[in-house]
Image (spheres, grey):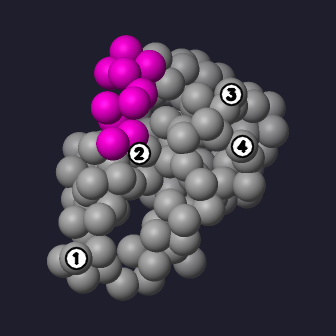
């Protein structure tokens, strides 16, 4: 699924502010190396974060997005530790059921199968981020 496909998916399936926070939290988890998603799903989730970042969540300010940008360019140990702290704080604020509901929704609404319909097949290969 390309970045354009993900942006189109978001346009057809707008995320709530809490879901935008969930997408940001998953991005933090990807960056701190604790995300257990398949590699193709991580690429799609990164594109989802990029598509909703201009949106308004409830938890994160511009400083967290700047931190994410820095970590995407080059993360050293100290930066990775800071990402980890932000992710743990977010996961403490967003309950596990909220995160699970978010992940279930994006799967059910076809984000990982590329066509916006419920997922019934394995995820398709995604392009690598620029």
Q: Position of residue 37 (x, y in %)?
A: 30, 43
- The local secondary structure at tag 3 comes to loop
Would you identify the image quadrant in which residue 100 lies? top left
Chief secondary structure of the magenta portion: helix
Distance of label 2 from label 3 (alpha carbons): 15 Å
Q: Residues within 10 Å of mark 1 (few under 14, many from 20)?
A: few
Of labels 4 and 2, earlier in sequence is 2
- The local secondary structure at tag 2 comes to helix
Relative to 57, is 30 above or below? below
Q: Which residue is mark 2?
A: 26
- The local secondary structure at tag 1 comes to helix
Q: Position of residue 124 (x, y in %)?
A: 48, 45
Of labels 4 and 1, earlier in sequence is 4
Distance of label 4 from label 2 (alpha carbons): 16 Å
In the displayed structure image, the side of residue 89 where residue 77 appears, left or right: left
Q: Which residue is mark 3?
A: 16
User: From the viewer's perspective, is the residue at label 4 or at label 2 nearer?
Assistant: 4
Q: Quadrant of the C terminus?
A: bottom right
Q: Residues within 10 Å of mark 4 (few under 14, many from 20)?
A: some
Q: Position of residue 73 (x, y in %)?
A: 44, 83
Q: Which residue is mark 1?
A: 78
Q: Residues within 10 Å of mark 2 (few under 14, many from 20)?
A: many
């Amino acid at each position: 699924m390309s970045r354009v496909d993900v942006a189109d998916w978001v346009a057809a399936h707008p995320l709530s502010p809490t879901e935008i926070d969930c997408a940001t939290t998953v991005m933090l988890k990807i960056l701190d190396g604790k995300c257990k998603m398949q590699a193709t799903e991580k690429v799609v989730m990164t594109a989802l974060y990029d598509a909703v970042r201009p949106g308004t969540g409830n938890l994160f300010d511009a400083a967290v997005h700047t931190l994410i940008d820095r970590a995407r360019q080059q993360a050293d140990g100290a930066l990775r530790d800071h990402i980890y702290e932000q992710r743990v704080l977010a996961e403490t604020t967003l309950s596990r059921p909220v995160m699970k509901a978010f992940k279930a929704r994006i799967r059910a609404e076809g984000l990982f199968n590329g066509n916006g319909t419920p997922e019934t097949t394995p995820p398709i290969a995604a392009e690598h981020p620029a």
